[in-house]
Image (tube, grey):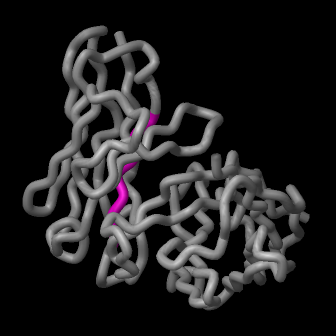
């Protein structure tokens, strides 16, 4: 059974870079139509999609984060990572990693993806 | 950026049927993009209940059903049970923002 687990520092200073890793067990990152993504949840803004990555290296990220997002895959293909630069207090949230699946079997149209497996989440606080 | 609007709360007695709404616009639900629904028990991660407007993943009781019409979607919970107390979120894609968007969330209370 596929399981995801987020890891990384729980406290990041303002203007620094938030770095998180999602470990994938019980399944494979290398899948033709699957994307792997990050979603965050804060009291003020609810659930917010941050970005997604395919095993080929194709990435999509939320334009509202103004280019601060970098997504990458581990060389062993058993984890993927998020870096968010120049953080502020507004980036304080619970961060989840998730597997994204397409509602159309074999499809890769971005408009048809949903999050079918989630990690438990990790709380990140931005504060000096 | 919650561009999908949901009522803040819905309540019902055990055994009743409740319906949760999710209202979008012509750039998301109205554009024909699928709507998906998630259940989140406080302190835990969201869990998918409905995907592709009407489909239930294996293991989700058939008490949960989804529908979509125009710029809105609905999640119905029949035979309400105490374990259904949770927050529920809809999700779709928005073409004007080029992002996956979530609803504002509805808290379901079982009286």
**Which one is in front, A103 or B105?**
A103
Q: Does the magenta run of residues contain B13? A: no
Give the image location of residue B46, x and y in percent: 53, 45
Give the magenta range.
B87-93
The front one of B60 and B74 is: B60
Magenta span: chief secondary structure:
strand
Q: Position of residue A113 (x, y in %)?
A: 40, 68
- The x and y percentages for residue A88 are 74, 72
Left or right of B101, for residue A6: right
Look at 42% across and 62% down and name the residue there.
A114
Residue B39, position as x, y percentages in the image:
44, 39
- Front residue of B105 and B14: B14
**Can the viewer see residue A87?**
no
Q: Is residue B26 left or right of residue A126?
A: left
Considering every residue shown, the one lying at the far left of the view is B70
- Residue B64, picture quadrant: top left
Quarter of the picture holding the N terminus of chain B: bottom left
Instruction: Give the residue displayed 80% in from the left and 67% down from the top.
Output: A21
Quadrant (top left/top right/bottom left/bottom right) for the C terminus of chain B: top left
Residue B34 visible in the shown view: yes
Identify which residue is drawn at 39% across, 51% down: B104
Rendered view: B87 above or below A53: above
Residue A15 sits in which quadrant? bottom right
Q: Is residue B88 above or below residue A83?
A: above
């Amino acid at each position: 059974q596929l399981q995801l687990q987020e890891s990384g520092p729980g406290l990041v200073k303002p203007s620094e870079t938030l770095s998180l890793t999602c470990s994938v067990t019980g399944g494979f990152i290398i899948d033709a139509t699957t994307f792997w993504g990050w979603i965050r949840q804060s009291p003020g803004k609810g659930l917010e999609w941050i970005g997604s990555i395919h095993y080929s290296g194709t990435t999509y990220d939320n334009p509202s984060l103004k280019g601060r997002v970098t997504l990458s895959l581990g060389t062993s293909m058993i984890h993927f990572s998020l870096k968010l630069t120049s953080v502020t207090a507004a980036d304080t949230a619970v961060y989840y990693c998730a597997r994204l699946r397409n509602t159309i079997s074999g499809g890769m149209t971005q408009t048809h993806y949903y999050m079918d497996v989630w990690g438990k989440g990790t709380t990140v606080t931005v504060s000096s | 950026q919650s561009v999908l609007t949901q009522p803040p709360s819905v309540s019902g007695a055990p055994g009743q049927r409740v319906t949760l709404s999710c209202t979008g616009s012509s750039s998301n639900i109205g554009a024909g993009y699928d709507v998906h629904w998630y259940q989140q028990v406080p302190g835990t991660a969201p869990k998918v209940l409905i995907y592709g407007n009407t489909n239930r993943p294996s293991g989700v009781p058939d008490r949960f059903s989804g529908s979509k019409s125009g710029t809105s979607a609905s999640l119905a919970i029949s035979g309400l049970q105490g374990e259904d107390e949770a927050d529920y979120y809809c999700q779709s894609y928005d073409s004007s923002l080029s992002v996956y968007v979530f609803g504002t969330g509805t808290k379901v209370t079982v009286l």
